[in-house]
Image (tube, coloured by chain):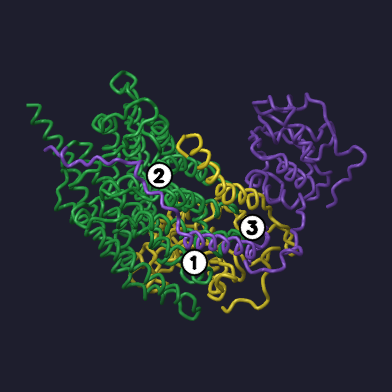
Chain colours: A yellow, B purple, C green
């Protein structure tokens, strides 16, 4: 153990064990998963993202949403609280992330889990108002305002259909409207596409269902 | 400030105590290692990728049912949505005057003097300049799709040859591999003249290969 | 203050170990650059951490400006702590210790010739490249080019610069070991060789598979967890332990460690450390065997931790030396932090307990204690020990050093205690689906409030260290000026 080659080969072999076990083998095992056929709707599972949602993933990464939000419903053998809380009808499995370019698993829940936010909050308008000023719709929320993703502009002619319905202190000045930018629309499209309410061979949906 | 006289020279290496390890310590560590081994053996679901519940017991007998093999057309549709719809549209009709249609296209269906090889070649290497599709003239460029795998290209082509009323035989990944090898030296996109200068190959029509059912 | 004298006296290569002065001269500039910049990044990282924790009690603080959002500042603070401070200080400590332990100046005997000059220029350029990469990577997160991969947020060009720079610096620790002029290798040297070999492999693999050429997302989870675990257990911790193994026995002037125990600890750490990160995915979207591997690794990590702490804390201690010597106190506190990390890690890997505390501040507390305690405290020790020797004079203001020590410990202890308690509290509340999430958020307010105070203390401590080191280095400059006259 006192000569470099001996020491290096020892270190190499021991290190190789964890590398093979946690990098190479998972890459082979999970990196080759394929989508499965959707018997009911004729597509594939997990479903394909739309173009806007793919662009929205970029916004999700750049704003660091992963710092506070996880995207995983834990296995019920470890804890049933995620399913009971209504964060998903079944635990997440690796195949669910096939359509992502980065798996935003997350390690902290300062905010709620988002793996099924598209099921829980299917309304785009709600998301826009929430992003613009979170505590306006969720009193006591820790989430910061993403008002930079919106544009305050003078109403020209008619009020835009896209304009946010804001009340109280958030409402823009008379004659002005708040509309979402392309980034906000992409982000919301991505959030709405986060839904894992379909069964997969390794993750069937149990009939007992969630509490909520 | 000089601190040399503070320095203690330590005669190291010679007087290291090599006391043997306490048997209790060794025993405890061996026990915990054994526990680790047993825990893994009983809670790892046979190291399968489709067992997620660590207390699942039925993994040895087949576990979760195996995933059904995926129809190439289904995968192809998914890939088409990701890569091709921007120009050729979800309907496969293209955009008049800009992007040629795939529906009924002689390129896609390998009709007339078109072969399957032409279709694969133009997808792999792209197409540029003037070209005619279904009697309409187009002047545009299609980018090369070399970055897709042979399997993906085969799936996309099989899909576009079978949807929207198209009904042509499937393209196999092996055929794409073969064409990719043959055209490996090509760097520029083809023009229609260059493409048509090559003899047509129609492997899908040889006896034994059945046409894809819609 | 007592200074430890490295290296050994035995020789087997026929070359006599070079005296410490020439060794120090050969590594002085790169090590001082690395240490100096590391401390400055530590100050900035602590400031960002404070802002981040204030944002948890007042979400509107510095609000409305997209690049000052929590989601951008939090990864910036974490990455600066990891790559700006810890990794950089570990490189500095590693190079200095390796040169001393091997009795060999950087670049061999031709240190004064043209070759030596080129070599020094190369290493100094590499240190500058490292800091440039950290700066640009941080600015990239700021500007919204984050990759969104936890702990690997730097864009691909910044991470490639970091890897290149590390290779240029790290290769020397291996070469120094190969050319050592002392006899039997010490345990500290093994740790250093292991750490410097592992980092490029860990960082390269993780970046390749997650950032440069991302693998299919279904397989990213385990690789990312492996990265977090390995970075701490196979790169930062081994360097911290090498410092303790090399310096503590010499500073305490007692017989060095029991060799059997040290050997066992070394191999166990290497064996289990690499699996240690999987506890981040217990119950996650990975097959059951990975969850189980995380459970086993988390619990078994106690083995190396116990062996190493029995080995190092079991040494006879002269309390007068301990009370008067800051490096020794930092080393001992670092070891206690390591024991705590092991215990928290084992607890938090037990499936039932993990189901409660995962995703809360509890698991975050372990990462913080690891980086700010088990790794940073020993690195502070090396810094306090190395700088006077490199400069050839006493340079620390002992009042400032004392304050730095006390405030760091109080701040860190407070932060960890609050996060553990707060995490446990929210974790238990989360298991009851009738308690709404917003309700839980409001319960954790007092914890977040006190965490701000703890972060403020840590910032003050970092500032004190910053002032102390600036003062030391500026003193050198003034001294040179005087003698120049």
Compared with residue C467, is residue A188 higher up or lower down, i.e. above or below? below
Tag 2: Cα neighbours inside 10 Å, few (<14), some, or many (≥20)?
A: many
Where is residue A28? Give x, y as percent.
64, 48
The alpha-carbon separation of the residues under discs 1 and 2 comes to 62 Å
From the viewer's perspective, tell me whether residue A20 is left or right of residue C361: right
Viewer-proximal residue, B88 or C235?
Answer: C235
| Residue at 61% from the left image edge and 71% from the top image edge | A89
What is the quadrant of residue C7 in the picture? top left
Q: Which mark is residue A95?
A: 3
Host chain of mark 3: A
Compared with residue C94, is residue A147 higher up or lower down, i.e. above or below? below
Host chain of mark 2: C
- Residue labelled with disc 1: A125
- Residue labelled with disc 2: C187
Tell which tag, 3 or 2, sits nearer the viewer: 2
Tell which tag, 1 or 2, sits nearer the viewer: 2
Host chain of mark 1: A
The alpha-carbon separation of the residues under discs 3 and 2 comes to 44 Å
Question: Is disc 1 in contact with disc 3, using a CB cutoff of under 8 Å?
Answer: no
């Amino acid at each position: 153990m006192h000569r470099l080659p001996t020491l290096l080969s020892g270190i190499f072999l021991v290190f190789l064990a964890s590398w093979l076990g946690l990098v190479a083998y998972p890459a082979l095992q999970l990196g080759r998963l394929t989508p499965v056929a959707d018997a009911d709707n004729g597509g594939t599972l997990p479903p394909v993202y739309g173009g806007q949602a793919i662009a929205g993933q970029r916004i999700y990464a750049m704003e660091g949403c992963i710092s506070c939000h996880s995207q995983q419903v834990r296995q019920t053998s470890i804890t049933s609280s995620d399913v009971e809380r209504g964060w998903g009808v079944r635990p997440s499995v690796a195949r669910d992330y096939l359509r992502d370019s980065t798996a935003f698993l997350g390690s902290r829940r300062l905010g709620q889990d988002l793996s099924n936010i598209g099921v829980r909050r299917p309304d785009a308008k709600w998301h826009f108002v929430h992003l613009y000023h979170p505590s306006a719709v969720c009193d006591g929320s820790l989430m910061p305002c993403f008002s930079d993703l919106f544009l305050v502009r003078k109403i020209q002619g008619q009020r835009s259909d896209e304009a946010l319905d804001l009340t109280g202190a958030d409402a823009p000045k008379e004659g002005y409207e708040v509309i979402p930018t392309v980034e906000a629309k992409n982000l919301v499209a991505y959030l709405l596409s986060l839904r894992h309410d379909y069964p997969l061979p390794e993750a069937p949906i149990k009939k007992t269902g969630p509490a909520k | 400030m000089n601190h040399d006289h503070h320095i203690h020279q330590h005669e190291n290496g010679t007087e290291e105590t090599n006391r043997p390890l306490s048997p209790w310590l060794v025993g405890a560590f061996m026990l915990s290692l054994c526990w680790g081994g047993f825990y893994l053996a009983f809670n790892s679901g046979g190291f399968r990728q489709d067992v997620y519940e660590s207390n699942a017991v039925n993994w040895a007998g087949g576990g979760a049912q195996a995933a059904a093999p995926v129809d190439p057309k289904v995968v192809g549709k998914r890939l088409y949505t990701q890569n091709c719809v921007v120009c050729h549209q979800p309907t496969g009709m293209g955009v008049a005057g800009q992007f040629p249609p795939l529906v009924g296209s002689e390129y896609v269906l390998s009709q007339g003097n078109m072969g399957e090889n032409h279709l694969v070649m133009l997808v792999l290497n792209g197409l540029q300049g003037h070209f005619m599709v279904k009697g309409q003239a187009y002047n545009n460029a299609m980018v090369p799709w070399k970055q897709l795998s042979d399997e993906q290209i085969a799936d996309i082509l099989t899909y576009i040859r079978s949807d929207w009323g198209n009904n042509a035989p499937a393209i196999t990944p092996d055929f794409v591999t073969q064409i990719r090898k043959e055209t490996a030296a090509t760097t520029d996109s083809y023009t229609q003249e260059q493409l048509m200068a090559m003899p047509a190959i129609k492997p899908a029509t040889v006896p034994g290969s059945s046409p894809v059912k819609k | 203050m007592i200074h430890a004298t490295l290296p050994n006296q035995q020789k087997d290569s026929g070359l006599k170990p070079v005296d410490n002065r020439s060794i120090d001269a050969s590594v002085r500039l790169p090590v001082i650059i690395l240490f100096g910049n590391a401390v400055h990044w530590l100050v900035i990282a602590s400031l960002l951490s404070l802002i981040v924790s204030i944002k948890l009690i007042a979400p509107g603080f510095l609000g409305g400006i997209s690049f000052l959002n929590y989601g951008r500042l939090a990864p910036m603070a974490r990455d600066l702590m990891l790559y700006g401070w810890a990794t950089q200080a570990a490189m500095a400590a590693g190079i200095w210790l390796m040169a001393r332990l091997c009795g060999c100046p950087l670049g061999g005997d031709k240190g004064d010739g043209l070759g030596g000059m080129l070599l020094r220029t190369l290493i100094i350029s590499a240190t500058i490249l490292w800091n440039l990469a950290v700066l640009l990577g941080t600015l990239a997160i700021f500007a919204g080019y984050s990759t969104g991969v936890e702990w690997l947020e730097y864009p691909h060009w910044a991470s490639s610069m970091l890897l290149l720079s590390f290779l240029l610096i790290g290769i020397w620790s291996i070469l120094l070991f190969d050319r050592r002029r002392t006899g039997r290798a010490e345990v500290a040297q093994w740790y250093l060789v292991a750490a410097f070999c592992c980092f490029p492999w860990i960082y390269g693999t993780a970046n390749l598979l997650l950032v440069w050429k991302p693998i299919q997302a279904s397989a990213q989870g385990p690789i990312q967890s492996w990265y977090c675990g390995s970075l701490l257990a196979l790169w930062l911790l081994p360097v911290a332990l090498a410092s303790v193994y090399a310096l503590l026995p010499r500073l305490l002037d007692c017989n060095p460690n029991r060799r059997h125990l040290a050997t066992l600890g070394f191999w166990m750490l290497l064996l289990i450390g690499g699996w240690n990160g999987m506890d981040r995915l217990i119950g996650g979207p990975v097959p059951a065997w990975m969850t189980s591997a995380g459970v086993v690794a988390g619990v078994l990590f106690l083995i190396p931790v116990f062996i190493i702490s029995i080995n190092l804390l079991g040494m006879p201690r002269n309390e007068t030396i301990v009370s008067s010597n800051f490096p020794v106190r930092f080393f001992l506190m670092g070891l206690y932090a390591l024991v705590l990390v092991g215990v928290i890690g084992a607890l938090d890997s037990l499936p039932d307990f993990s189901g409660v505390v995962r995703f809360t501040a509890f698991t975050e507390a372990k990462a913080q204690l690891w980086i700010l305690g088990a790794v940073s405290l020993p690195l502070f020790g090396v810094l306090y020990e190395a700088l006077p020797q490199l400069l050839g004079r006493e340079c620390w203001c002992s009042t400032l050093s004392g304050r730095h020590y006390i405030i760091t410990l109080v701040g860190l202890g407070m932060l960890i205690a609050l996060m553990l308690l707060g995490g446990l509290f929210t974790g238990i509340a989360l298991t009851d689906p009738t308690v709404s999430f917003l309700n839980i958020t409001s319960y954790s307010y007092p914890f977040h409030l006190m965490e701000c105070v703890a972060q403020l203390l840590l910032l003050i401590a970092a500032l004190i260290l910053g002032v102390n080191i600036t003062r030391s280095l500026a003193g050198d400059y003034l001294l040179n000026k005087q003698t120049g006259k």
